[in-house]
Image (cartoon, coloured by chain):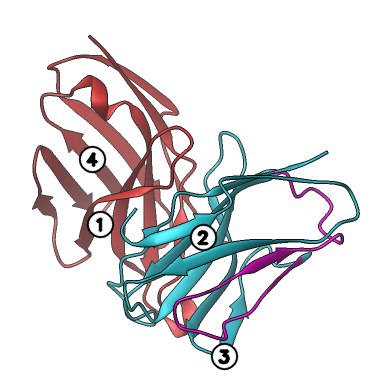
Amino acid sequence: DGGITQSPKYLFRKEGQNVTLSCEQNLNHDAMYWYRQDPGQGLRLIYYSQIVNDFQKGDIAEGYSVSREKKESFPLTVTSAQKNPTAFYLCASSPQGPILTDTQYFGPGTRLTVL
Amino acid sequence: GESVGLHLPTLSVQEGDNSIINCAYSNSASDYFIWYKQESGKGPQFIIDIRSNMDKRQGQRVTVLLNKTVKHLSLQIAATQPGDSAVYFCAENMARGTSYGKLTFGQGTILTVHP
């Protein structure tokens, strides 16, 4: 998984609760990303960050929040406002971010289930 | 909006055969393409990439072909092995504005290799 760790691997949440997913990378990459994957579908971008203390909304940011206080860490909070949070969440990082040929490398994912 | 899609959702092959996975993209401004392999319950793994100024790139047992005229991308896997069974995604990166570093993913093709 290229030095990107996500925890926990499985997470269960009751309706109405916020939950935070961890993503850490030791690759010294500037950019980090959060994706959501639903069964039988491709990846959809939630948030991304090209540099510390800065982040932008992706295509499906509603009901999610992020922070980027350290280069190595990009935690994702799934809030109670997210209507359908059960999914597989993938974190990725890339060396430079705003570069055309910047390849993204993925972590192992966290499977979130709302009970 | 622009999107990346796949012609075939599933592909079954015999061990030792060559596999070809196809991807159609609609954004003529896309300049960079990546193929990922995703095994069940894991994060996507980088396989190979190609820039739009190339039409072919080879790796170990894999070849990516890019046909910009018809906006078509393919991944060829030589001597397919059971360990190649996975979902394969193509992704594109558009070289304009704030889209740098933002990948758009296709839905994926399930490759099943029978021994």
Which chain's residue wears label 2? B
Q: Quadrant of residue B13?
A: top left
Give percent across and percent down for residue A76.
64, 67
Residue B2 badge: 2
Q: Could you tell me the amino acid type at mark 1? A: Lys
For label 3, the crowd category at 10 Å Cα-Cα, with few meaning under 14, some 14 to 19 and many 20 or more, is: few
In the image, taking residue A74 as reference, residue B101 lies left or right, namely: left
Q: How far apart are marks 4 and 2 (CA)?
A: 21 Å
Q: Could you tell me the amino acid type at mark 3? A: Asn
Between circles 1 and 4, the one closer to the viewer is 4
| Residue lying farthest to the bottom in this orientation | A53
Q: Are marks 2 and 1 in contact (CB under 8 Å)?
A: no
Q: Distance between the residues labelled 1 and 4?
A: 15 Å
Q: Distance between the residues labelled 3 and 4?
A: 38 Å
Residue on which the image places disc 1 = B68
Residue B75 badge: 4
For label 4, the crowd category at 10 Å Cα-Cα, with few meaning under 14, some 14 to 19 and many 20 or more, is: many
Discs 4 and 2 share one subunit:
yes
Q: Could you tell me the amino acid type at mark 2? A: Glu
Q: Are marks 4 and 2 in contact (CB under 8 Å)?
A: no
Q: What element carries label 1?
A: loop
Is A63 placed above or below A108 here? Answer: below
Residue B71: say if magenta.
Answer: no
Colour red belongs to chain: B
Give percent across and percent down for residue A48.
54, 74
Q: What's the magenta region?
A: A64-86
Which chain's residue wears label 3? A
Q: Distance between the residues labelled 1 and 3?
A: 38 Å
Question: How many labels were placed on the picture?
Answer: 4
In terms of sequence position, does the residue under pointer 1 or pointer 4 come before the other? Answer: 1
**What's the magenta bit mostly, secondary-structure-wise?**
loop
